[in-house]
Image (spheres, rainbow, N blue to C red):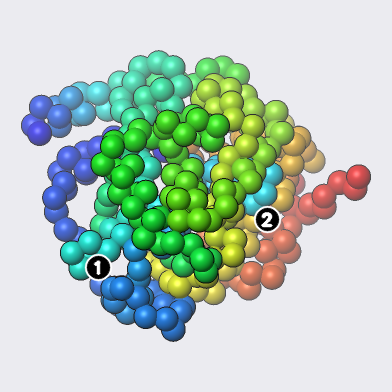
Amino acid sequence: MSIVRALVLVFAAACSSGCATALTPAAYRTFDAESASEGELDFHGLPLQSGQLVVSDSGEADSLLLSMLGEQYTPYSHAGILSIEGGQAYVYEAYALLWPFLGGPPTDAMHGHIRRVTLEQYIGRQRVTAIFDPEPGVDKAAVVAFARARHEDGTQFDPYFDWRDHSRLYCTEFAALALHAGGRPLPTPVRVRDNPSLRVALDWLKVQAPAIVTAGSLTEGAERVALISERLSAREVEAYFAAKRELHRRFTDDQKLGNIWVWSWRGLQLRPQIEAFLEASSQWPHETAAELADDWLGAFALPVG
Amino acid sequence: MSRLLLVVLLLVPLSSCVSLPRDVAGELEPVAHHRQDHFHKP
């Protein structure tokens, strides 16, 4: 998260605390229920239940970085747990804001905890949001009970993404432990890529964990029940995720962070050609992502051996 | 809340001036040669 964006969020949070937002499904390109099963709450036509998994991609530069971090690609970079309370849909999530700082890595200045936001507020921050029903056998009441308990005890956000220490939690770690409380086996963390350029940045950020829990590992075996995007149609979401997968494939160990991202006064940003490629990708079928990348970013074949 | 807003507004310019360590900034520069850059068409 860029410094300026974080400050804007601090400002917005201070101004809007307690305010409700009005969601209008007709304003969304995608607001699709993908399950015939009935939910505990009919949320503008979406069948929702407490204990469901919410995953998302904000479309920002830092979201792409999180998608690229692990050896296995994950389309989503953030996760939370859905809870129906008093006829309202809420999401519990591990979330932090970057507070003003003058030195040291930004991770030292990130402070947050397990918080509860309305589903409307959550969706409003994301480019793509998906809701998944955990695999059969998972006790969703236990899942949401874990989430509420971590909110009530004020569990802190873990800016260093350390899965080995559960005293502080990052977003997907929190969701993984909540699902585990409902009986889902813990996911196998995905190894952080062995990319020297990435390692320089992670060392600065004090992220030393050898592996991370990805949102993708939480959706394995789960059934997607809803897909939501204000800007993209369902087909475009698929094409956008395929384009991100292609970027992940191209980010081999010899690549520098600077081939994809740039640092400016606004914080971490995508390079213009990457932004243009992602923008254009949604206009093409997802099967053509590699060919489209050859056209936009240059021919590429994985080295043999 | 007004005090919070004041603190935030005063610190925005300071935070925007934070620069990266030289090694990290170096990694955020693209490579000089297109053949080593999988994200830039020659």
How far across and down, in percent of the image, does residue A102 sit? 35, 17
Does residue A106 lie above or below A268 as drawn?
above
Specify few, some or many for label 2: CA neighbours under 10 Å numbering under 14, 14-19, or 20 or more: some
Residue plotted at (79% across, 52% down): A300
Q: Which mark is residue A198?
A: none
Q: Amino acid at mark 2?
A: Glu
Closest to the camera, between mark 1 and mark 2, is: 1
In-front residue for pair B8/A174: A174
Q: Earlier in the sequence, mark 1 or mark 2?
A: 1
**Residue at which label 2 appears:** A246
Residue plotted at (42% across, 31% down): A167
* Left or right relative to A297: residue A131: left
Tell me the subunit letter for badge 2.
A
Residue plotted at (49% across, 51% down): A180
Q: Amino acid at mark 1?
A: Leu
Residue A61 in view of the camera: no
* Left or right relative to A69: residue A181: left
* Left or right relative to A125: residue A166: right
Tell me the subunit letter for badge 1.
A
**Residue at which label 1 appears:** A23
* Left or right relative to A250: residue A87: left
Badge 2 element: helix
**Alpha carbon distance from label 1 to label 2:** 33 Å
Badge 1 element: loop
Residue A284 in view of the camera: yes
How far across and down, in percent of the image, does residue A293 sit? 69, 58
Residue furthest bottom in the image: A36
Does residue A19 lie above or below A38 as drawn?
above
